Amino acid sequence: QLQLQESGPGLVKPSETLSLTCTVSGGSISSSSYYWVWIRQPPGKGLEWIGNIYYSGSTYYTPSLKSRVTISVDTSQNQFSLKLSSVTASDTAVYYCARTLYSSAWSGFDPWGQGTLVTVSS
Amino acid sequence: QSALTQPPSASGSPGQSVTISCTGTSSDVGGYNYVSWYQQHPGKAPKLMIYDVYRRPSGVPDRFSGSKSGNTASLTVSGLQAEDEADYYCSSYAGSDNLVFGGGTKLTVL
């Protein structure tokens, strides 16, 4: 059974770069034609799609974050990562990683990781 | 402000049916069949309930169904059960390599 697990610092200072990693177990990140996804959810608020990456490295990003976001994949470690630069308090959120249900980048997301809370504060 | 509009709340009694709407535009919901619905219990990760407007992933009860008419997608939960009480989010492909979510609907089982 495929499982995803987010990891990274829980506290980031304003203006610095948020870095998270999603480790995939129970399957290879490059074995099938899926997209790997980052989504976030500010405390008490709704979901926001951040971006997708294919195992080959092609990416899609939400327009509002595009200038600050980089998603990358490391097939040797079976991981993909998120970097968000110049963070502010409004970037405080639970960050989730997920996989697309099938080969389209826009299909539903399943499964999801458990999520990790990142707080931006000095 | 979310790109897709959902009612903040919905409710129904056990055994009843409830429908949650998700209104967008011809550039997102109305233009593509990439509408998904997610269920989220407090403190938990979202769970995919419906994808591609009306398809159910394996393991999702057939009490959950999805549909679309014009720029509005809908999630119907039939035979409401206590465990259906949760937040529900819709999402849609919005063209130009972008995906948007709705603001979420809190479903209460009375």
Image (cartoon, helix red, strand yellow):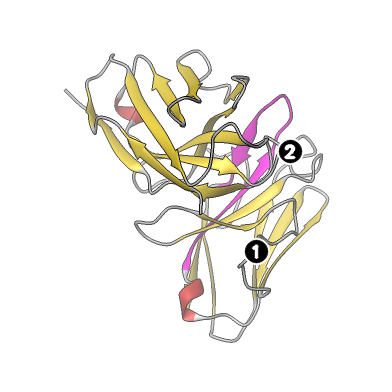
In the image, residue A26 sits, relative to residue A78, either above or below, namely below
Which label sits on residue B28? Answer: 2
Give the CA separation, mark 2 to mark 1.
26 Å
Where does residue B30 sit, x and y in percent of width and height? 80, 44
Tell me which residue sits at (59%, 31%) in the image: A30
Residue B84 drawn in magenta: no
Q: Is residue A23 left or right of residue A64?
A: left
Evaluate whether label 2 is on the same chain as label 1: yes
Where does residue B37 sit, x and y in percent of width and height? 62, 55
Tell me which residue sits at (62%, 21%) in the image: A56
Q: Is residue A77 left or right of residue B28?
A: left
Q: Is residue A2 left or right of residue A12?
A: right
Crowdedness of circle 1 by 10 Å Cα count: few (<14), some, many (20+)?
A: few
Give the residue pinned by disc 1: B58
Where does residue A48 sit, x and y in percent of width and height? 50, 37
Magenta range is B86-102
In the image, residue A70 sits, relative to residue A10, either above or below, namely above
What is the three-letter code of the residue carrying label 2? Asp
Visible in this render: residue B110?
A: no
Q: Is residue A74 left or right of residue B56?
A: left
Q: Quadrant of residue B67 in the image?
A: bottom right
* In the foreground, B69 or A74: A74
Output the chain of dot 1.
B
Q: Quadrant of residue A102 in the image?
A: top right
What is the three-letter code of the residue carrying label 1? Ser
Visible in this render: residue B37?
A: yes
Compare marks 2 and 1 and give the one earlier in the sequence: 2
Output the chain of dot 2.
B
Which label sits on residue A116? Answer: none
* Label 2 close to label 1 by CB (< 8 Å): no
Mark 1 element type? loop
